[in-house]
Image: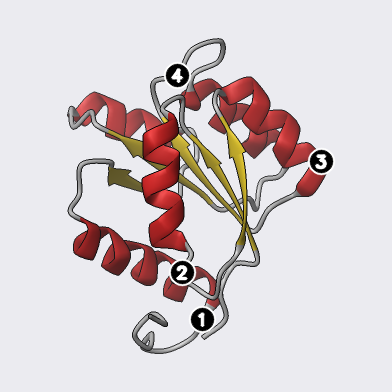
Amino acid sequence: MSYPQTILLTDDEAHIRKFIGLVLRKFDNPRILEASDGAQAVELYKQHKPDMVLMDVNMPNMDGLQALEQIRSHDPDALIVMLTSLTNRQTVEECVRLGANDYIRKDTPREELTARFDEIIADCFGSGTPEAAPQ
Protein backbone atom coordinates (compact mmCIF):
# COMPACT_ATOMS: atom_id res chain seq x y z
CA MET A 1 0.00 0.00 0.00
CA SER A 2 1.21 3.51 -0.70
CA TYR A 3 1.02 6.24 1.91
CA PRO A 4 0.54 10.00 1.69
CA GLN A 5 3.88 11.75 1.37
CA THR A 6 2.66 15.11 2.68
CA ILE A 7 -0.05 15.70 5.28
CA LEU A 8 -1.43 19.06 6.38
CA LEU A 9 -2.38 18.86 10.06
CA THR A 10 -4.52 21.76 11.25
CA ASP A 11 -5.53 22.29 14.86
CA ASP A 12 -5.33 25.31 17.14
CA GLU A 13 -4.02 23.15 19.99
CA ALA A 14 -0.30 22.37 19.69
CA HIS A 15 -0.52 19.25 21.89
CA ILE A 16 -3.17 17.77 19.56
CA ARG A 17 -0.96 18.44 16.52
CA LYS A 18 1.96 16.79 18.32
CA PHE A 19 -0.08 13.72 19.34
CA ILE A 20 -1.64 13.19 15.91
CA GLY A 21 1.71 13.87 14.24
CA LEU A 22 3.27 11.06 16.28
CA VAL A 23 0.50 8.70 15.19
CA LEU A 24 0.90 9.70 11.52
CA ARG A 25 4.67 9.13 11.50
CA LYS A 26 3.96 5.40 11.63
CA PHE A 27 2.67 5.66 8.06
CA ASP A 28 5.94 5.75 6.14
CA ASN A 29 7.05 8.93 7.98
CA PRO A 30 5.25 11.56 5.86
CA ARG A 31 6.19 15.21 5.73
CA ILE A 32 3.76 16.94 8.10
CA LEU A 33 2.85 20.57 7.57
CA GLU A 34 1.18 22.26 10.54
CA ALA A 35 -1.37 25.07 10.71
CA SER A 36 -3.03 26.51 13.80
CA ASP A 37 -6.12 27.92 12.10
CA GLY A 38 -8.17 27.55 8.95
CA ALA A 39 -6.67 30.58 7.19
CA GLN A 40 -3.15 29.13 7.55
CA ALA A 41 -4.46 25.76 6.36
CA VAL A 42 -5.90 27.25 3.17
CA GLU A 43 -2.65 29.08 2.40
CA LEU A 44 -0.48 26.02 3.11
CA TYR A 45 -2.78 23.88 0.98
CA LYS A 46 -2.47 26.26 -1.96
CA GLN A 47 1.33 26.43 -1.57
CA HIS A 48 2.05 22.71 -1.07
CA LYS A 49 -1.03 20.76 -2.23
CA PRO A 50 -0.55 18.01 0.38
CA ASP A 51 -1.81 14.50 -0.23
CA MET A 52 -4.07 14.62 2.83
CA VAL A 53 -5.56 17.26 5.12
CA LEU A 54 -6.52 16.61 8.73
CA MET A 55 -8.41 19.56 10.15
CA ASP A 56 -10.08 20.53 13.40
CA VAL A 57 -13.59 21.96 13.15
CA ASN A 58 -13.39 24.62 15.89
CA MET A 59 -10.51 27.06 15.50
CA PRO A 60 -9.97 30.82 15.76
CA ASN A 61 -9.72 33.23 12.78
CA MET A 62 -11.23 30.76 10.31
CA ASP A 63 -12.89 27.57 11.47
CA GLY A 64 -12.39 24.19 9.87
CA LEU A 65 -15.72 24.23 8.04
CA GLN A 66 -14.86 27.50 6.29
CA ALA A 67 -11.38 26.20 5.47
CA LEU A 68 -12.86 22.92 4.20
CA GLU A 69 -15.11 24.88 1.87
CA GLN A 70 -12.24 27.03 0.56
CA ILE A 71 -9.87 24.10 0.04
CA ARG A 72 -12.62 22.10 -1.66
CA SER A 73 -13.39 25.03 -4.02
CA HIS A 74 -9.66 25.31 -4.82
CA ASP A 75 -9.23 21.54 -5.31
CA PRO A 76 -12.37 19.38 -5.62
CA ASP A 77 -10.21 16.24 -5.30
CA ALA A 78 -8.52 17.17 -2.01
CA LEU A 79 -8.56 14.45 0.65
CA ILE A 80 -9.90 16.16 3.77
CA VAL A 81 -10.57 14.44 7.09
CA MET A 82 -12.15 16.51 9.83
CA LEU A 83 -10.98 16.18 13.43
CA THR A 84 -13.13 17.30 16.31
CA SER A 85 -14.25 16.69 19.84
CA LEU A 86 -17.84 17.49 18.81
CA THR A 87 -20.15 14.57 18.17
CA ASN A 88 -23.43 16.22 17.37
CA ARG A 89 -25.14 15.03 14.23
CA GLN A 90 -25.44 18.54 12.81
CA THR A 91 -21.64 19.01 12.80
CA VAL A 92 -21.05 15.65 11.10
CA GLU A 93 -23.72 16.37 8.49
CA GLU A 94 -22.25 19.82 7.80
CA CYS A 95 -18.76 18.32 7.33
CA VAL A 96 -20.15 15.80 4.86
CA ARG A 97 -22.27 18.42 3.06
CA LEU A 98 -19.19 20.60 2.57
CA GLY A 99 -17.21 17.69 1.14
CA ALA A 100 -15.19 16.14 3.95
CA ASN A 101 -14.02 12.65 3.05
CA ASP A 102 -14.25 11.46 6.63
CA TYR A 103 -14.61 12.53 10.25
CA ILE A 104 -12.60 11.42 13.29
CA ARG A 105 -13.05 12.31 16.96
CA LYS A 106 -9.88 13.71 18.52
CA ASP A 107 -10.45 11.79 21.74
CA THR A 108 -10.22 8.45 19.96
CA PRO A 109 -7.68 6.18 21.72
CA ARG A 110 -4.30 5.96 19.97
CA GLU A 111 -4.74 2.37 18.76
CA GLU A 112 -8.17 3.12 17.30
CA LEU A 113 -6.89 6.35 15.78
CA THR A 114 -4.07 4.46 14.06
CA ALA A 115 -6.58 1.90 12.76
CA ARG A 116 -8.90 4.66 11.44
CA PHE A 117 -6.04 6.41 9.66
CA ASP A 118 -4.98 3.05 8.22
CA GLU A 119 -8.52 2.50 6.87
CA ILE A 120 -8.71 5.97 5.36
CA ILE A 121 -5.25 5.71 3.82
CA ALA A 122 -6.02 2.25 2.42
CA ASP A 123 -9.26 3.53 0.91
CA CYS A 124 -7.60 6.54 -0.68
CA PHE A 125 -4.02 5.49 -1.44
CA GLY A 126 -3.95 1.71 -1.51
CA SER A 127 -5.81 -1.12 -3.06
CA GLY A 128 -7.15 -4.22 -1.42
CA THR A 129 -6.74 -5.02 2.25
CA PRO A 130 -4.26 -2.74 4.01
CA GLU A 131 -1.21 -4.21 5.64
CA ALA A 132 -0.49 -3.33 9.23
CA ALA A 133 1.05 0.10 9.53
CA PRO A 134 4.83 0.02 9.86
CA GLN A 135 5.95 0.24 13.48
Across and down, in percent, residue 98 comes to 48, 33
Q: Earlier in the sequence, mark 4 or mark 3?
A: 3
Q: Residues within 10 Å of mark 2 (few under 14, many from 20)?
A: many
Which residue is the site of mark 3?
A: 47
Q: Earlier in the sequence, mark 3 or mark 2?
A: 3
Asked which secondary structure carries label 1, the reply is loop
Q: CA distance from mark 2 to mark 4?
A: 25 Å
Residue of label 1 = 126
Q: Where is residue 47, by image quadrant?
A: top right
Disc 2 is placed on an element classified as helix
In primary-sequence order, the first of circles 1 and 2 is 2
The residue pinned by badge 4 equals 59
Q: Looking at numbered disc 3 in the image, what kind of residue is underneath it? A: Gln
Q: Position of residue 126 (x, y in %)?
A: 51, 81
Q: Nearer the viewer, mark 1 or mark 3?
A: 3
**Secondary element at image label 3:** helix
Task: Measuring from the top left, give residue 1's x and y in whole percent.
Answer: 51, 86
Answer above or below: position of 44 versus 33.
above
- Contact (Cβ within 8 Å) of mark 1 with mark 2: yes
The amino acid pointed to by label 2 is Ile
Q: Nearer the viewer, residue 102 or 118?
A: 118
What's under tag 1, amino acid-wise?
Answer: Gly
The amino acid at mark 4 is Met
User: Is 73 left or right of 86, judged from the image as shown?
Assistant: right
Residue toward you, 133 or 49: 133
Regarding residue 96, the answer to whether it shows in the image is: no
Disc 2 target residue: 121
Q: Is residue 105 visible?
A: yes
Question: At 64% across and 21% down in the image, what residue appears?
Answer: 39
Against 4, residue 18 (above or below) is above
